Image (tube, helix red, strand yellow):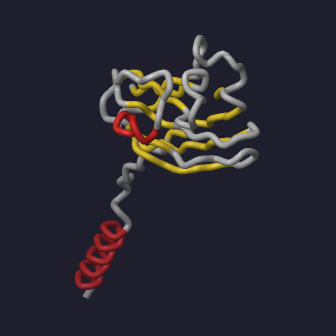
Amino acid sequence: MKLKYMLILTAFAALFFTACGGGEEESAEPEAATIQVLQNDNYYGSTPDNADNPPVWTVNSGGQVAIELTNNGTVEHNWAVIRMDADVPETFDSDANGDLLLKETGLVAAGEEFRESFFAPAEAGEYLVICTVAGHYPSMQGRLVVQ
């Protein structure tokens, strides 16, 4: 009779530990990288010299990115990633040059904030980021570094 109870207890314990995962840890999904973009009147960041000193945002290749845009300017802006090594005309026109874009956020009205997630390009390198609103590029630009 004792043997019967021992077998039942052993079977119950085996089921319990199996159901609980046996102490193994599950691998967690990597957290999305968050980049914060401050938009001002015709420049990104805290200084109006983007053409010579562009802000840089760094992300992992193919990784999920959460972007947080804050428009402190008086007009609408966006944030657009240009294809690697593309020749961007100084007078960027969204209709004529839209094929150069890898990623574009929606327009953010003055005084508003915008958040969304996307996947970073798979190819590592440095990507030009611009505001595609007419007349904002080249003074409103940055760099997305993909590692």
Q: Is residue 18 left or right of residue 45?
A: left
Against 23, residue 36 (above or below) is above
Q: Is residue 26 left or right of residue 57?
A: left
Q: Is residue 28 left or right of residue 57?
A: left
Q: Position of residue 14 (x, y in %)?
A: 29, 70
Q: Position of residue 23 (x, y in %)?
A: 38, 56
Residue lying at 36% horizontally and 33% vertically, measured from the top left: 100
Q: Quadrant of residue 86?
A: top left
Residue lying at 39% horizontally and 25% vertically, measured from the top left: 147
Residue lying at 39% horizontally and 35% vertically, measured from the top left: 97
- Between 94 and 6, the one lying in front of the other is 94
Q: Position of residue 129 (x, y in %)?
A: 49, 29
Against 127, residue 76 (above or below) is below
Q: Position of residue 71 (x, y in %)?
A: 70, 41
Quadrant the N terminus occupies: bottom left
Q: Quadrant of residue 61?
A: top left
